[in-house]
Amino acid sequence: MSTQELPKCCVCGQPTTKRCQACAKSGIDLFFCSPEHQKLVWKHHKQVCGPNADPFCPRALTDEEACALLTHAREARTVSLDAFPPSLLSALPRHGAAMQQLGAIAAKGSVTIADLMENYAGGPPGSFETRILPNLRNPVDIPRRSRYTGLTKARSFLLQHLEGFVGGTGDVYVHTIWAQVARLGAFAGGWLGTADNDAEMRLLSQINHHLLILVTLARIKHADDSAIPDAWILRSFEHVVDLHADIKPFESIQALHYMTNHYRSRTATLADRSYIAVPKPGGRGPTLRYPD
Ligand SMILES: [Zn+2]
Ligand SMILES: [Zn+2]
């Protein structure tokens, strides 16, 4: 959050100083203008509220997710550097973990979900099915940060696989809400590079809370268009972009567009609206605002 703007309700964008008290105790700032707006997103927020707020501690894999992961874990997906043109790579932060991963994948030519997870966990071939997946279905003994990273990677790799890796038709209304937050949160994690200290993990947790609220609002609106005004989605997304710029200022307008396209392609309200790039209040580099 910019230091030069008043806190805003993470549901409707109205300035407010009221926040979720349980999350505040964990160092996470989530402002709600009213009990009604807190209740609107409570169904999902309650699972990551308070002690689960930082590190952001999503729910264990659902049966549906575990089944899909097992089904697709060993399917080779062909990938090529052609999907990542130099103009795109140069627009992105050079040391992001996501970019290193993309480079390794592209060099090998093909990849499986199990390869990626065994590589991440440092496990031998075959350990995805025997150890990693069972742990993610019942992660009570796993430290919160590892739980966040493991679940985020598993869900994100699954969605990438299902959507054909790049240029997929995925939108935020399908699969579990946790898978969608993981997919978007993995992008934020790549933007950060490494979340290897408490301050960086807190930034990542803060972004994940806002992603969960953004996807929650988008799904409510998808089910009933009149339930959520467009402006709430736009304000919520502006907040997410500002948080990305807090992690690492966008180096160029192109880098901003690349990041926003990742979200806009997945959410109808965002895809339908055009934004303007503006200097980030109190910060370096650009961010975006939607004209009212
Ligand atoms: Zn509100
Ligand atoms: Zn909370």
Image (cartoon, rainbow, N blue to C red):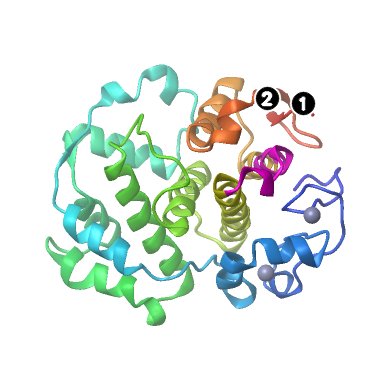
Q: Quadrant of ligand 2?
A: bottom right
Q: CA distance from mark 2 to mark 1?
A: 7 Å
Amino acid at circle 2: Tyr
| Bounds of the magenta segment | 224-238
Amino acid at circle 1: Pro
Q: Which residue is mark 2?
A: 275
Give how far across and how far down residue 81 sits, in percent.
27, 25
> What secondary structure do most residues of the magenta stretch adopt?
helix
Q: Is residue 129 above or below residue 168?
A: below
Left or right placement of residue 163 versus residue 80 in this view: right
At x 62%, y 51%, the residue is 217
Q: Is residue 153 above or below residue 133?
A: above
Left or right placement of residue 200 versus residue 36 in this view: left
- Sequence-wise first label, 2 or 1: 2
Q: Which residue is mark 1?
A: 291
At x 17%, y 33%, the residue is 109
Q: Is residue 254 visible?
A: yes
